[in-house]
Image: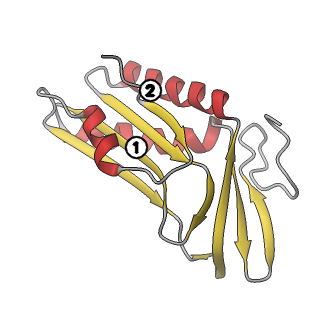
Amino acid sequence: MEQNLFNIVRDPISVEEVTNQVSRREAGAITLFIGTVREFTKGKRTLSLEYQAYDSMAVKMLSQIGEEIKSKWPDSLVAITHRIGKLEITDIAVVIAVSSPHRKTAYEANEYAIERIKQIVPIWKKEFWEDGTLWIGDQLEKNSYKEGRPSKGE
């Protein structure tokens, strides 16, 4: 049974389901990164976030990250699920699970995954603050903050 290790979803993410995707007999370690919506960013109070993605390209880029990880850490297995839509404070936005025979590999591959997501995956978030909003996440340009609505994928 082929399972999809890389997903963009609109419903809450099950950490257990993502973890189970990488659980295997030869793995002595599974690391998890759980990205949640925080209330304060640089002193500004966030009320909620709205994530949008170019879904098919985002899945393709998540899969590419999986291939990169497999190339750098051949004994690892990674699963990534990112949520889109409106998220409230403490909601889970992304879960990355990496399994490997040894913990160091799992830690390194997991950190690599979140950094690459921010660099290449077409996902944008709109931050809703008490005093305004801002779209964030322009992975293809050096400037990572951009006013207005995202144009990629629409």
Does residue 115 sit above or below 126 in this rendering?
above
| Residue for point 75% across, 37% down | 140
| Residue for point 65% across, 34% down | 55
Does residue 131 sit above or below 72 in this rendering?
below
Q: How is the image coloured?
A: secondary structure
Residue 148 on image: x %, y %: 88, 56
Mark 1 belongs to which amino acid?
Ile
Residue 61 on image: x %, y %: 59, 28
- Which numbered marker is on residue 154? none
On the picture, is 151 further left or further right than 82? right
Residue that badge 2 annotates: 66
Residue 14 on image: x %, y %: 36, 50
On the picture, is 39 further left or further right than 3? right
Residue that badge 1 annotates: 96
Does residue 90 sit above or below 101 in this rendering?
below
The image quadrant that residue 40 belongs to is bottom right
